[in-house]
């Protein structure tokens, strides 16, 4: 399954449009973010996991790729 959403990213007081794509498929369970610097990826992965769990949703036990 592929989903795509247009959103904004803030850099200071400037906003830029970005497109986020998410693919959920079978395979070894995992959550991967591509397209960011390595330090930002690790932080973003944990923030997304926490946001999903704290919103009352169950984190899926599948392979998830975010671009």
Image (cartoon, rainbow, N blue to C red):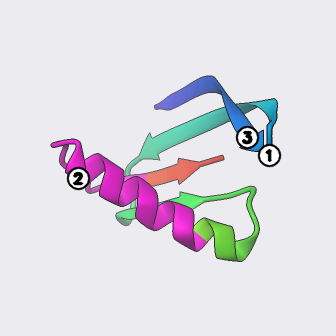
Categorize mark 3 by other alpha carbons within 10 Å: few (<14), some (14-19), many (20+): few
Foreground label between 1 and 2: 1
Categorize mark 2 by other alpha carbons within 10 Å: few (<14), some (14-19), many (20+): few
Badge 3 element:
strand
Which numbered tag is attached to residue 10?
A: 3
Which of 7/25 is in front?
Answer: 7
- Which residues are drawn in magenta? 42-63
Q: Residue at left 36%, top 58%?
A: 49
In percent of width and height, residue 12 lies at 80, 46
Which of 33/11 is in front?
Answer: 11
Which of the two discs, 3 and 2, labels the residue nearer the N terminus? Answer: 3
Q: Where is 32 relative to 51, above or below?
A: below
Q: Are marks 1 and 2 in contact (CB under 8 Å)?
A: no
**Farthest residue toward the bottom?**
39
Q: Are marks 3 and 2 in contact (CB under 8 Å)?
A: no
Which of the two discs, 1 and 2, labels the residue nearer the N terminus? Answer: 1
Q: Is residue 22 left or right of residue 7?
A: left
Q: Is residue 10 visible?
A: yes
Residue identifier under label 1:
11
Categorize mark 1 by other alpha carbons within 10 Å: few (<14), some (14-19), many (20+): few
Instruction: State how far apart marks 1 and 2 are (Cα).
Output: 27 Å
Instruction: State how far apart marks 1 and 3 are (Cα).
Output: 4 Å
Q: Residue at left 53%, top 31%?
A: 2
Q: Are marks 1 and 3 in contact (CB under 8 Å)?
A: yes
Q: Residue at left 54%, top 39%?
A: 22
């Amino acid at each position: 399954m592929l989903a795509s959403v247009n959103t904004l990213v803030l850099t200071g007081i400037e906003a830029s449009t970005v497109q986020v794509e998410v693919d959920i498929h079978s395979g070894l369970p995992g959550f991967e973010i591509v397209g960011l610097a390595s330090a930002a990826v690790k932080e973003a992965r944990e923030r997304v996991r926490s946001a999903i769990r704290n919103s009352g949703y169950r984190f899926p036990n599948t392979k998830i790729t975010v671009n």
